[in-house]
Structures are given as structure tokens and as C-alpha cells.
Image (cartoon, rainbow, N blue to C red):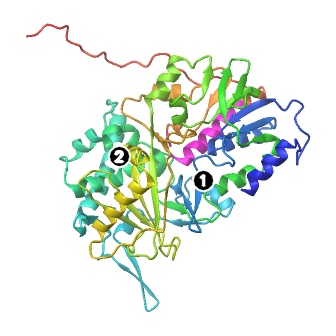
Amino acid sequence: MMLTRRFSYLFLMIVSAGGRPFANPDHHQVLVLGGGVAGIIAARSLHSKGVGDFVIIEARDELGGRMRSHNFGGTTIEVGANWIQGTQVPGGPANPILDLAIKHNLKTRANDWFGSISTVIVFSSLILTFDASRPATYDSKGATDYLDVFKTSVDDFSNLTVLAGARVDEKLVDVTGRTGYSLIAPRKTDDHSRASEYYQFDWEYAQTPKESSLIAAGNNFTYNTDEGGFSGDNQMSIDPRGFKYLIQQEAQEFIKPRNLILNTTVKSISYSNSGVTVTLTDGKKVTGSYAICTFSLGVLQNNRVEFQPPLPAFKVEAIQSMTMATYTKVFLRFPKKFWFDTEMALYADAERGRYPVWQSLDHPNFFPGSRILFVTVTGDYSLRIERLSDSQVKSEIMGVLRTMFPNITVPEPTDFFFQRWNDDPLYHGSYSNWPPSFFSEHHDNLRANVGNLYFAGEAMSIKYFGFLHGAYFEGLAIGQMVASCINGEGCVGLKQVKDVVNLHPYEIPNGTSD
């Protein structure tokens, strides 16, 4: 990117486009560790509160974090974050990512995840019509209409969120999403039901209902307009500059070259109540009065950075108790289009989660003529395919496609690509998911500062965990909090809970038998 190369060059020359270099280039009021959404918005909060002596330290050669694009046969695809999830209803709050997209003229299109499985846009004699007679639902027999099952799964998920809200209101213990589904209706074990449930649940949270909290899954407020959410709509980025463009452009408005260090990885962080010292992998040390760590939950869980002193037990327990899930989009480009005309399609396999959710980018709304199709897998299946070679994964997917379209000669793809998110040492996953054993006090501890070291990121958002706007709000809040400390407006540490305990003790038999 020209943006990042220019910043790197000017930083190395120690030239400031908007002011003189810092008196001590190795010490700053605030170190912002990570250049994703949380880090950039935290830095913007500092800047807006008059704190200009900060530096963002980013391991990659550009800003954006998990907003990552890839040139795929001449088309810009998003291998990470792809959607503005929840936009705005008239008179309601706007998703701040939507605001940034509008501000920076990012090109997006509405992506109908549900209706488009059954609705095909048909152009006939220049008249726009809709054909619901060809649903894009498939199984081992090829095209098979199980829209009734799919629609039931939509209702089941809606009822699941109602049940989750009721458990909060009634102060009932949390259970798994799987338990919640079982309380709604008898368990469904056929291929069509499992695939449809996957589409509602796993495709959103990147883990199964069995691995996920019922209460948290049902109370992520992103789509709930009654609880501070935005809307049920989703806008997909189709901008040739990449989805990351909106946050990079926002950064250009306030970041000077002296505020940015790229291509630099943090090795260790030493923290206290008086300051923070960061040691880089090249041995250089950078100090700050404060630091804001925006590393992914996966990086923290895998001990990619050494903390000195070691993080306290309450913090480690919180980090290790939440889940970093993996969400993998696998892209294929073909010599010609042969697949469904809807935006989305669903494949029901005998193995739950085996290449179920498909999206056509060669569609009038997205990249017509691109000949690109992609399939999404999540959770353990993502981890599985990361252990395979590209050729093995491609072979499996081609087998599924030939099952879906038995009467077509399906050609070999000309291009193939997927990002191995879990294997990437900068992320170790895609985004966080809340497991049923994760208490609200754990979340307090996950968010809590230790000394002058603060933490921000999507995992720290109790209302919007797993979403870009969760990272935005946490970066905003923590940046403002640290700026208040510096400006003498009050500096109160975030809530910590030393021991997270059960309300009732477990009743363990004493070893005697009846």
C-alpha cells in the first residue's frame, strides 16, 4: 500500500509532515500495540483529547488488522472481515463502521443472507422479476428443496434469542446453545436440519451451539434495535481498495509519520503503575507512560508476547476462558460460471459443517463476470483444513461441488485461495466467541488493566464481541480513558474480580455409596 510505504519511509527519516519529531523517539506518552480497528480508534481518541505523543506499533506492513484483502484474479476479495453487520434503522443509532464507510466513500452492497437463498433475480425483456421456484439448497442428491426446514431454523434461532433473554431476566444459570435449542423443540438430527441450524448459528459465531453460551449468543446486541443494536441488514464490502480502506483513510486524518511503526513485532511487555516498556523482536526498547494492547485474544492465549511480571492469575484465567474461534472463507475462480444464481446457497452433508455455506461473487450485486465462488467453514473444520495442503482442500471442495451439480461437468478452478487464520502467529483465529463457562466477572477481568497497561479489542466488548464495531467501541472507550489519565481528568482502574466463584457450591459426594 502506498499509504503504509510512505509512512514507513518518512518515519525512518524521522520527518514529520505536521510537526517536529518527538524529543525522545523511544519514549511516548502512550504506546498503542496493534494497528487494527481498536488500535486506530484508540489512537484517534487520544488525538481528539489533545494527546499527540503516541505511537502505533504494528507487525504488518499496513494498518487494518483482521480487515485483510487479497487480489484474486484481478478482483479484490476479503479474506477477513467482509461485512458491516447491522447498519441503521430510521431514527436509530448507526453502526460506527457504517459511518466510516459513508465518510470515506467505501463501495458496499446489501447482502441478503436469508431471503437470497430462495430468491433469484431474473432479468427478462428488461423487466426485473423474482423467482422463488429454484431455491439454492443442496444435499448428497444434488439440488433439493428443503426451504421449509431452513425457514423453521430461522424461527428456531429467533426463539433461541427470546429464551436467552428470558434466562437473563429470570437470573437463571447459563447453559449451552445446544441445551437452549433442545428446550425449544425436539432435537433434529437429519442432514437438512443440521445444515440449516449451522447457517443460523455456527456461520455467525464460528463455533457450534454445544461450544457456545446460550445467554451470550442470544444477547449480542448487534442486530437488536431494542438493546442498542443497529438493524438486521448487512452491507458487504466490494470496494477494489479493500474493506480496510475505511480504517486506513480514517488513520490518515490524524496519524503523522512519527506516530507509526510498521513491520515491527512486540516480543515482551514490562508493565507497572508508573509506565510500560515494550521490547521488540529486534531487541529495541520503546517506553511509554501508558500502553494500550489490542492484540487478538488468540495471541494472548498462545503466549506470543511475554509479560513482565507475568499477568496476574485473574487475568490469565479470563484470557484462557474465552474462545478464539476460526472462520475460513475458501475462494475458487473458474473458467466459467456454472452454479446457482442466488447470492447464497446451502449444502447439507452427512458430516455437520462440511463445506455448508456458499456465496457467489459472480452476481449482479457484487462482481458480475468475476467467475468467483467461495465457501465458508468454521470452528474445528477450519482447524482441520488448515492442517491439509491446498491441493487436498481443493480436491475435497471439488468433490462437494460435483455432488451439488451432478448433471454438470464442473471444471477445475483456475485460482484457489484461503487464509489460514489459526496458524497465523499474529492472530491465532478470526474472532472471539463466548463459551457457557465464561462469566460476566471473567469478562470484567479480560477487559481490566494491569498497572498502566490497558487492553482493547472486539473480545473485550460485552455487547458486541466478535464484531468490528465491538473493536471500535472498545478502542474508543479505552483511548478516552487513558487520555483522561494523562490530562488529569481522573484515572480509575477498570473493574477486577480476584476470584470468580459459583453462586452455589458443587455438591460432591463424600465417597460413600447407598
Frontmost of labels 2 and 1 is: 1
Q: On the rendered image, what quadrant is the C terminus found in? A: top left
Mark 1 secondary-structure assignment: helix
Q: Position of residue 178 (x, y in %)?
A: 28, 41
Mark 2 secondary-structure assignment: helix
Q: Position of residue 496 (x, y in %)?
A: 54, 21
Taking the image as drawn, is residue 207 in sight?
no
- Magenta segment includes 226: no
| Secondary structure, magenta segment, majority class | helix
Give the residues drawn in magenta, as a range: 463-482
Residue ID at (40%, 38%):
216
Q: Which residue is mark 1?
A: 97
Residue ID at (39%, 72%):
411
Reading the chain from its start, which is encountered first: label 2 or label 1? 1
- Specify the quadrant of the image occupied by residue 440: top left
Q: Which residue is mark 2?
A: 161
